[in-house]
Image (cartoon, grey):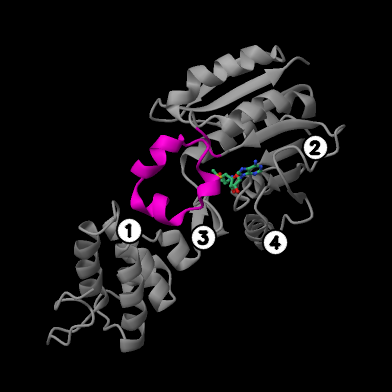
Amino acid sequence: MGDPAGPESSSAAPWTVRRILEWTTAHLATHASETPRLDAEILLAHARGCQRIELYTHFGEIVSEDQRAIMRDLVRRRAAAEPVAYLVGHREFFSLDFRMTPAVLVPRPDTETLIIELLELAKRHEAPRILDVCTGSGCIAVAIAVNLSGASLTAVDISGEALAVARENAQAHGVQDRVRFLKGDLFAPLEASERFDFIISNPPYVRDDEIANLPPDVRLHEPLLALRAGPEGLNVIRRLIAEAPGHLQPGGHLFVEISPQQAQDVERLCAATGAYEAVRIVRDLAGKDCALHAAIAG
Ligand SMILES: C[S@@+](CC[C@H](N)C(=O)[O-])C[C@H]1O[C@@H](n2cnc3c(N)ncnc32)[C@H](O)[C@@H]1O
């Protein structure tokens, strides 16, 4: 931040909470952020060690030099496209706070739709067994465990670093006794005979040729392992659809997040297995195709 009006400036007007928020919002609006005001608030609250709401109750307060130094560094990194969730080390998802590091994908609101769909069916079971494949930060498994007290979860990821974050998140929300974490490739770490009532996954599904066009936050900072999935973006989804029936109880359900362009492909892949009795594409609140829901015969 070389701007003379920046928080490092020694200009006469004092750097109050309000002034820093206004300056940072204007700066981030032209540097990498689509949500500059929100980012400015989250970063300043982090630098001050307070809740966002407290910024508003201390609007006129002068920010200390120590806090401004922390803020300058955060704003510089945000302007270079580092995701806010990595800068502050956490992110809210499904109304829960999740620890974040660059080893895990930052959870997206679309994924909440997938969880809501599963919870609607799973709450009819007393003690559902649920598998979250490609768990990353553990946000899906932990959100389900918190919302379904009778459920037992298994969460798989190929990345040991991601699993370490997922374990911390389970611990932070007090569900570590009901979430088992396994490292490995999709279903490989499971016993061949293991069956679940529900399998849920937000797998990598970005086409190889789309990677270069992703926003810089995603392309430069989020793990490629969480995103890239071959020429059609279906490398992982194809295997999930083919192998899930072998790990579902009769009447079991599979939920997989997809990109809207993959809806027809995943319906075709499900049909090709001959294993699913019902297949539907789930839409988000904006009416966009966002997930596959497939069920095997009861
Ligand atoms: C799109 S992220 C999803 C993370 C989290 N479930 C969420 O919704 O935010 C995909 C995750 O799949 C993991 N992954 C990629 N390939 C895998 C594989 N073959 N087997 C298991 N996990 C895999 C990545 O390490 C990454 O954590």
Q: Which residues are magenta?
A: 204-230
Label 3 vs label 4, nearer the camera: 3
Q: Earlier in the sequence, mark 3 or mark 4?
A: 3
The circle on residue 38 is 1
* Residue 205 on the magenta segment: yes
What separation in Å lies between label 1 and label 3 (alpha carbons)? 20 Å
Mark 1: give few (<14), some (14-19) or many (20+) Cα within 10 Å: some
Q: Which residue is mark 2?
A: 127
Residue on which disc 3 sits = 102
Give SS at disc 3: loop
The residue identified by callout 4 is 171
What secondary structure is marked by label 1?
helix
Residue 77's label in the rendered image is none
Circle 4 or circle 2, nearest the eye? 4
* In this rendering, position of residue 192 left or right of residue 160: right
Dot in front, 3 or 2: 3
Specify whether 37 is left or right of 252: left
Q: Residue at x 49, y 21 (%)?
A: 263
Residue at position x 52%, y 24% in the image: 282
Q: Are marks 1 and 3 in contact (CB under 8 Å)?
A: no
Taking 234 as reference, is 167 above or below it? below
Q: Is residue 46 left or right of residue 29?
A: right
Under mark 1, the amino acid is: Leu
Q: Position of residue 288 (x, y in %)?
A: 41, 26
How far separated are the C-alphas under marks 3 and 4? Answer: 19 Å
Q: Earlier in the sequence, mark 1 or mark 3?
A: 1
> In the rendered picture of this protein, how many numbered marks are placed on residues?
4
234 inside magenta stretch: no
Q: Quadrant of ligand 1?
A: top right
